[in-house]
């Protein structure tokens, strides 16, 4: 249940940011776009421990974000499930951005241009054309990110440690059980739960991605 709570919170935090980044990368042209694209995909190639360490520096008591949260709001994400959600969201962000970006690029830009020639504002084109047509990709990104969040380990244990009932998610629970002699049954049970949840999410994400591709093909035709 803790893993589900962390993963869902991670998706709610990350999805708006992922959509904004995907929209910028898919539709805008500006200096530094290649650098932004590389930065977004950095969690895919960096060791998760490095991401966790960077989060520790950012959200720790002496960090730029963590210090402000503690001074102004009296809040801290250190050693809390909310910190685990932030770590999971950061690690899932590249996969989500890619899925949403492909969905946005599949929407024929000529539809928006035609609507603008008929008097529609850019905001109306966004909310009535681009957003509805890219929703299958957004849903696929949500599910794919959720599956990735369920399996997050390295960044989480580095950033918020392995605290039972607070930050010990499914993957950390498997790791903890592996350290206990004779806990094979618990490891098998947790591993099967993890495989079942992740496989189901991946199959659903693939089905939504195919629907997005088919929708884009129909628009082009």
Image (tube, helix red, strand yellow):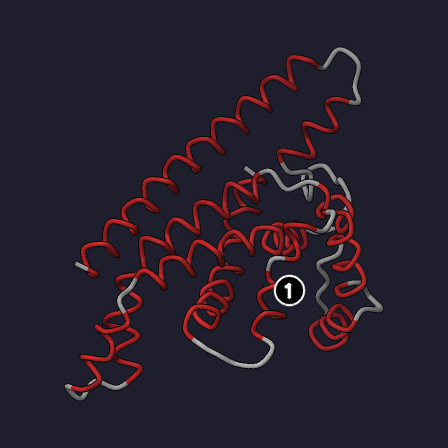
Relative depth, front residue between 181 and 209: 209
Residue at left offset 80%, top offset 55%: 53
User: Is residue 189 left or right of 213 when viewed as pictured?
Assistant: right
Horizontally, residue 185 falls left or right of residue 195, namely: right
Q: Is residue 19 left or right of residue 63?
A: left
* Residue furthest right in the image: 62
Q: Position of residue 62 (x, y in %)?
A: 85, 69
Residue 154 at x, y = what percent?
Answer: 73, 43
Q: Residues within 10 Å of mark 1 (few under 14, many from 20)?
A: few
Asked whether 80 or 125 is in front, the reply is 125
Quadrant of residue 129 within the rendered picture: bottom left
Quarter location, residue 60: bottom right
Residue depicted at x 43% and y 53%: 99
Q: Position of residue 71 (x, y in %)?
A: 77, 75
Q: Quadrant of the C terminus?
A: bottom left
Q: Secondary structure at mark 1?
A: helix
Quarter of the image containing the N terminus? top right
- Disc tally is 1
Question: In this rendering, is residue 89 above or below 199?
Answer: below
Residue at 55% in and 29% down: 194
**x, y (%) of residue 216?**
26, 56
188 left or right of 55 in image: left
User: Which residue was labeled with disc 1?
Assistant: 39
Q: Is residue 114 above or below residue 161?
A: below
Q: Residue at x 56, y 56 (%)?
A: 93
């Amino acid at each position: 249940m803790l893993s589900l709570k962390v993963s869902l919170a991670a998706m709610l935090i990350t999805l708006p940011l992922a959509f904004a980044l995907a929209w910028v990368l898919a539709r805008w042209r500006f200096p530094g776009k290649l650098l932004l694209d590389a930065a977004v995909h950095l969690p895919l190639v960096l060791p998760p421990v490095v991401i966790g360490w960077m989060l520790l520096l950012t959200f720790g008591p002496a960090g730029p974000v963590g210090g402000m949260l503690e001074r102004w709001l009296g809040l801290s994400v250190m050693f809390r499930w909310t910190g685990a959600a932030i770590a999971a969201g950061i690690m899932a962000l590249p996969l989500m951005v890619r899925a949403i970006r492909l969905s946005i690029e599949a929407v024929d830009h000529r539809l928006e241009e035609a609507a603008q020639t008929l008097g529609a504002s850019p905001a109306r084109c966004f909310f009535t054309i681009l957003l509805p047509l890219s929703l299958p990709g957004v849903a696929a990104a949500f599910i794919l990110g959720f599956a990735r969040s369920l399996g997050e380990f390295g960044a989480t244990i580095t950033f918020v440690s392995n605290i039972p009932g607070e930050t010990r998610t499914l993957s950390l629970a498997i790791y903890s059980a592996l350290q206990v002699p004779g806990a094979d049954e618990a490891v098998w049970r947790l591993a099967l739960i993890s495989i079942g949840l992740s496989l189901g999410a991946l199959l659903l994400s693939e089905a939504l991605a195919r629907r997005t591709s088919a929708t884009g093909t129909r628009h082009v035709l």
